[in-house]
């Protein structure tokens, strides 16, 4: 057999092996198909909320808060967090969204589609908040530099004004001195 034939046979064997494993149920792992559907529903929800009007977003926030107050399960927690995490939404509150996601994202429980989504959103929110904090600090530093430059310009202008005043006073003193010298020369008798 040539090498191409061996490669094809190997690929076919792997494909058959994977097809056979796809139907296997591992007894210790929970069946996560319902959670996969919930994740898809949450993604659809996030897309719908992102394009909703500000009024619709506020109504949805009210409804989501009520659902979450009654039942603090993963689905209601993620739904509310998605709404609050939507960039540009009228109800955007990244800090609250992160606090809602933290228990799901940081738990050491077995991986599930809902927890994976929570971890992804939590990481993105934290990164976005870190970037905003860095940007805010940069803006504050820029404002501080501008203020320092303005103060230095004002000090420079004040010193220039003081220098002009001193020059004018010096010129006035020189004029006085010249006048005194002229009067002194005029008061002396002239030699014949």
Image (spheres, grey):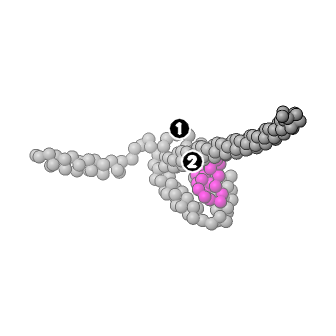
Q: Residue at x 61, y 56 (%)?
A: 83
Task: Compare residues 34 and 65 and report the one nearer the observer.
Answer: 65
- Measured as percent of width and height from the top left, residue 7 is found at 19, 47
Figure quadrant of residue 145: top right
Give the farthest residue toward the left: 1
**Magenta-span inclusion, residue 82:** yes
Picture coordinates of residue 132, whole percent (x, y): 60, 47
Q: Which residue is labeled 1 in the image? A: 108
| Residue annotated with mark 2 | 128
Instruction: Name the residue rendered at 67%, 55% in the picture.
Output: 65
Q: Label 2: how many residues lie within 10 Å, few (<14), some (14-19) or many (20+)?
A: few
User: What secondary structure predominates along the stretch shown in magenta?
Assistant: helix
> Could you say where residue 54 lies in the image, as x and y percent from the top left?
65, 64
Does the magenta-highlighted stretch encompass residue 51? no
Q: Residues within 10 Å of mark 1 (few under 14, many from 20)?
A: few
Closer to the eye: label 1 or 2: 2
Return the x and y of residue 181 as percentages of the image width and height: 83, 35
Q: CA distance from mark 1 to mark 2?
A: 24 Å
Q: Which portion, as a residue range, is magenta? A: 77-98
> Which of 83 and 142 lies nearest the eye of the viewer?
142
Look at the numbered disc 1 and give the secondary structure of its residue. loop
- In the image shown, does 52 or 153 lie closer to the viewer? 153
Residue shown at the point (44%, 43%) measured from the top left: 29
């Amino acid at each position: 057999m040539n090498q191409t034939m061996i490669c094809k046979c190997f690929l076919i064997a792997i494909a058959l092996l994977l097809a056979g494993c796809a139907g296997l149920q591992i007894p210790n792992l929970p069946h996560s198909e319902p959670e996969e559907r919930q994740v898809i529903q949450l993604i659809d929800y996030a897309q719908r909320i992102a394009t909703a009007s500000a009024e619709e977003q506020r109504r949805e926030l009210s409804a989501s808060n009520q659902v979450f107050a009654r039942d603090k399960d993963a689905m209601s927690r993620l739904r509310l967090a998605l709404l609050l995490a939507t960039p540009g939404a009228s109800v955007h509150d990244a800090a609250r969204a992160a606090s809602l996601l933290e228990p799901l994202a940081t738990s050491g429980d077995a991986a599930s589609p809902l927890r994976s989504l929570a971890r992804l959103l939590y990481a993105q929110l934290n990164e976005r908040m870190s970037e905003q904090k860095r940007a805010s600090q940069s803006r504050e530093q820029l404002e501080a530099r501008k203020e320092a430059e303005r103060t230095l310009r004002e000090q420079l202008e004040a010193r220039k004004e003081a220098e002009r005043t001193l020059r004018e006073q010096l010129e006035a003193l020189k004029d006085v001195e010249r006048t005194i010298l002229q009067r002194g020369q005029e008061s002396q008798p002239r030699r014949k």
